[in-house]
Amino acid sequence: MTDLEVPVLIVGGGGAGLTASMTLSTLGVDSLLVSALPTTSTLPKAHVLNQRAMEIFTEVGVAPEIYKRSTPAENMQATGWYAGLAGSHEDYGRKLGELEAWGGGYVDPDYVAASPCRTCNLPQIRLEPLLKDHAEKLNPGKLRFNHELIDLTQDADGVTATIRDKDADTTYRVRSQYLIAADGGRTVGKLVGVAMNGPRDLMKMVSVHMTADLSPWATDDHVLIRWLVNPDFGGSFSGVLVPMGPNHWGPASEEWVFHMQYATDDPDAMAEGKILQRMAATLGIPESVPTVHRISTWSLEGVIADKFREGRVFFAGDAAHRHPPTGGLGLTSAIHDVYNLSWKLAAVLAGRAGDALLDTYEAERKPVDQNNIDKSIANAMNHFTIDQALNLSHKKTAEENWAELTPLWHDGPTSADKRHAVNRAIASQTIEFHHHNVEFGYRYDSVAVVDDGSPAYVPLDPVRLYEPSTKPGHPLPHAFVERQGERLPLGALVHGGKFVVLAGVTGHAWIEAANKIAAENDIPLVAATVGVLNADLVDIRFSWMKNREISDSGVVLVRPDRYVAFRSMDGVDDPHAALRAALSQILATELR
């Protein structure tokens, strides 16, 4: 092969790398993706795709196929806790309690009001081939699997990478202006001297991917994740059971993944025979039921890269941060990383922005990713509150543990207190299954956000409650609007990497100024008034009116990643100067 030149080289073909490829393609940026692995993931791994991730996938055009293949909404309304799955005890498999999960299948009014997209569930083993196919359609011939990065050097103008084609056993060089490291931390970080730090080996987990008919025992159609609190084995983390489809979901799922916790130094976690024995005993089902496809061992950790940028190299996804899967924040964080980065790379490559804009990638994403790490660890640890409420213990006999559960289902003098204790413990799991302000309402603070001097945001609940706001640094509040009889979400106006200027019904001067600045500086931009009457966009459900926080003469400027970057509550004497100053700060360049 001859040497290649490309604006952006993407190293890694997982969720982060494939999303980067798709996003850059939709922004008109040429890229090449190389992956040392021969295929996409062969492990089920992550499976929850939150609302903001699905908004991104909608923008790049792959969301319809994901929704088609994923868990139906009615099969992912809740998560449940059970006294094991099956066994000889009369109360085996009985439900301890359940909790709505991530919007309850898109029926929670807060989730419906937040986004036109519902939370989705599709295991990575099934998701990544869809992403790969779509990325190849957008960027034909520019995705190369089994091509391994073996070296790179940087200079003032770009990155030179040496790639080995493992099939042909040949090497070639790629010259790029920027490189996105989405390789899970395997290679790039070591080559450029960026390390990952944080707590490691918090727990050792074993995952068994299997085909099994569990419908006789897993009978709740609406429950997605089953936490098996097995009294015979001491309580929580006896096992976590997750359906994998692929053609049916709920109890009818053909495939499942079963997760088990081990001590970090337990040698049994590496012994396949002992793992399968424990799984059969814990589940209480005949050993002939499951057909095992893959057993994987992994450690819970909470690590983050020292830097998200080193020269012209940017780190994203597992190459930038790794944390427990509790809460479904890993893959979605990776998707959000590259979405934040891609529009900035596009702006700099097009000459519309200065290099300093790229520094805001770390400034914005690293605090969010660190918060996601902290919350994921807290989510994992919080599951032990179930044991505490039930008063289960590994030190007790199976009979003693079962006796602790009896008051839940059979009335007695301690039943009311026990039931409410369990109720409270399960309600505390909303930090994982209703963490709407963490997964959707996260905010950015950098020079690419123009502070409007309004009071600091003080959340009603920093984890559970997303509060829509147009305060700079917040995500654009969702609202359906109509134009020429067509209904669309306001957020869709950014598609294709556009800035969006939204003014009140008397804010025409803002619109004129925005269009003039866009034309003079070649900035992709959409400007419109929004209101009920006499507006370019009709606020048909009055959602914008409820959340806009500006007057009829005010304005909101939205970045291409749907984040509010500038706001004026009212009109100003010189809207052209105000918008030009704001965009100049955001883009780190002096506009005309």
Image (cartoon, helix red, strand yellow):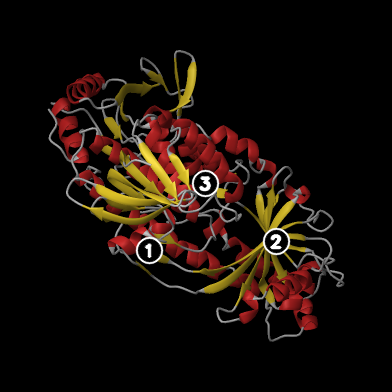
Callout 2: helix, strand or loop? strand
Residue drawn at (80%, 54%), measured in percent from left and top? 219
Disc 1 and disc 3: Cα gap in Å? Answer: 21 Å
Tell me which amino acid carries mark 3: Asn
Classed neighbour count for the residue bearing mark 3: other residues with Cα under 10 Å, few (<14), some (14–19), many (≥20): many
Q: Pointer 1 and pointer 3: residues touching (CB < 8 Å)?
A: no
Q: Which percent across, then down, holds residue 50? A: 52, 46
Q: Nearer the viewer, residue 322 or 128?
A: 128
Disc 1 and disc 2: Cα gap in Å? Answer: 35 Å
Residue 389 as seen in the image, left or right of residue 27: right
In the picture of the structure, the residue carrying the numbered disc 3 is 50
Tell me which amino acid carries mark 1: Ile
Tell me which amino acid carries mark 2: Gly
Classed neighbour count for the residue bearing mark 2: other residues with Cα under 10 Å, few (<14), some (14–19), many (≥20): some
Residue drawn at (57%, 62%), measured in percent from left and top? 429
- Of the numbered discs in the image, which one, if any, rests on residue 97? 2
Q: Nearer the viewer, residue 244 or 161?
A: 161
In the picture of the structure, the residue carrying the numbered disc 1 is 304
Q: Which percent across, then down, holds residue 394? A: 68, 82
Q: From what the image shows, is residue 328 above or below residue 567?
A: below
Q: From what the image shows, is residue 45 above or below residue 492?
A: below
Of labels 1 and 2, the one closer to you: 1
The answer to whether any part of residue 445 appears in the image is: no
Of mark 1 and mark 3, the one earlier in the sequence is 3
Of mark 1 and mark 2, the one earlier in the sequence is 2
